[in-house]
C-alpha cells in the first residue's frame, strides 16, 4: 500500500535581464532584436513531468538536496526578426516603371531567428539502489569531472564518465538537473510579393520556410544509466526538418 502526501513546500527563485532593440520600418527595413539572460532555480519543478511515475524527490528526508536549476531554465535566449522590402516598384527608389518594376516590384523578405541555450536535465541510475521503491535516484558525481564537458554530439552529448553508481542502499550525491541539454537554433523565413490589381484589389503570393537551413534541433539525451550503451546519446529531435508552404491571398 502506498500513501501519497502532497505538500505546498516547494520554493523557486528567478532573476533575469532583458534587452530589446527595435528599428521601426524605415527605407524598407524593420528589425526587432531581443535578448534575455535569466536564471531560475527551485526544488520541485518537473518531478511529475519528466520521469513518469517519479512523483517524489530523491530523498524525502532531504528536500533541500533537490535545490537546483529549474527544468525550464533557459540561461540565454535571443530572438530576432527582420523584414526587408526590396527597393523596386512604384513607390520605391528604383525601377518605378516598366518591365523592371513589373518583375521586381512588391517583393518582401522576412526572417525570424531563434537561438537559446539548453534545458537542465536530471541524470538517473535507472535502478532502485536505495531500496525505497520510489524510483527517483541520481548517481554519484565523480570527483574532477565536469558532467557537461562532453563531445556534445548525438553519440555522446555529455561526459558520461562524470557519473558512477552509488553504493547499495545509499543515495547519489549528484545535484539535480546538472546536465544541460542541447540548445535550440531555428531560422524561419518567408518570401512574398504584393501585386496591385487596381480598384483596391491586390494579390499576395507567399513562400514560407520553417527550419530554413534544415538543421536538426536535438532532443534531450538519454539520462538513464540502466543501459550504458544508450547513456548520453540522443535519438530524437525537438522540431521537424525543413517544411515549405505556399499561400495566396486576395484582397478586395
Image (cartoon, rainbow, N blue to C red):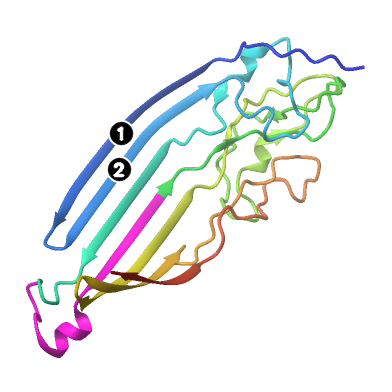
132 or 55: nearer the viewer: 55
Q: Is residue 67 left or right of residue 23?
A: right
Crowdedness near tag 1: few (<14), some (14–19) or many (≥20) residues, C-alpha within 10 Å: few
- Left or right of 165 on screen, residue 23: left
Q: Which residues are magenta?
A: 92-114
Residue 141 in which image quadrant? top right
List x then y, in percent, for residue 103: 22, 85
Res 232 visible? yes
Q: Circle 1 sits on which residue?
A: 18
Q: Name the foreground residue: 192 vs 188.
A: 192
From the top left corner, tell me how far across and down residue 206 is, in percent. Answer: 36, 71
The residue indicated by pointer 2 is: 34
Q: Are marks 2 and 1 in contact (CB under 8 Å)?
A: yes
Q: Does the magenta segment cover residue 30?
A: no
Image quarter of residue 42: top right
Callout 2: 10 Å neighbours few (<14), some, many (20+)? some
Q: Earlier in the sequence, mark 2 or mark 1?
A: 1
Up-down: is 99 above or below 77? below
Query: Residue, x 40% and y 31% (percent of image)?
Result: 38
Amino acid at each position: 500500500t502506498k500513501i501519497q502526501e502532497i505538500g505546498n513546500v516547494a520554493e523557486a527563485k528567478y532573476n533575469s535581464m532583458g534587452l530589446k532593440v527595435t528599428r521601426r520600418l524605415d527605407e524598407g527595413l524593420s528589425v526587432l532584436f531581443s535578448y534575455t539572460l535569466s536564471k531560475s532555480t527551485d526544488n520541485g519543478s518537473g518531478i511529475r513531468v519528466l520521469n513518469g511515475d517519479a512523483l517524489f524527490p530523491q530523498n524525502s528526508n532531504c528536500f533541500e538536496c533537490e535545490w537546483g536549476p529549474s527544468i525550464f531554465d533557459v540561461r540565454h535566449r535571443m530572438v530576432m526578426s527582420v523584414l526587408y522590402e526590396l527597393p523596386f516598384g512604384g513607390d520605391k527608389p528604383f525601377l518605378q516603371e516598366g518591365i523592371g518594376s513589373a518583375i521586381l516590384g512588391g517583393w518582401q523578405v522576412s526572417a525570424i531567428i531563434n537561438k537559446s541555450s539548453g534545458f537542465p536535465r536530471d541524470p538517473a541510475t535507472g535502478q532502485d539502489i536505495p531500496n525505497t521503491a520510489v524510483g527517483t535516484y541520481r548517481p554519484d558525481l565523480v570527483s574532477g569531472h565536469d558532467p557537461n564537458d562532453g563531445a556534445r554530439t548525438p553519440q555522446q552529448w555529455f561526459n558520461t564518465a562524470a557519473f558512477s553508481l552509488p553504493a547499495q542502499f545509499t543515495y547519489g550525491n549528484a545535484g539535480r538537473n546538472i546536465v544541460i541539454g542541447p540548445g535550440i537554433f531555428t531560422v524561419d523565413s518567408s518570401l512574398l510579393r504584393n501585386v496591385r490589381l487596381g480598384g483596391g484589389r491586390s494579390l499576395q503570393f507567399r513562400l514560407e520556410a520553417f527550419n530554413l537551413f534544415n538543421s536538426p534541433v536535438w532532443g534531450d539525451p538519454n539520462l538513464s544509466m540502466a543501459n550504458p550503451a544508450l547513456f548520453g546519446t540522443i535519438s530524437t529531435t525537438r522540431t521537424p526538418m525543413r517544411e515549405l508552404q505556399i499561400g495566396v491571398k486576395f484582397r478586395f
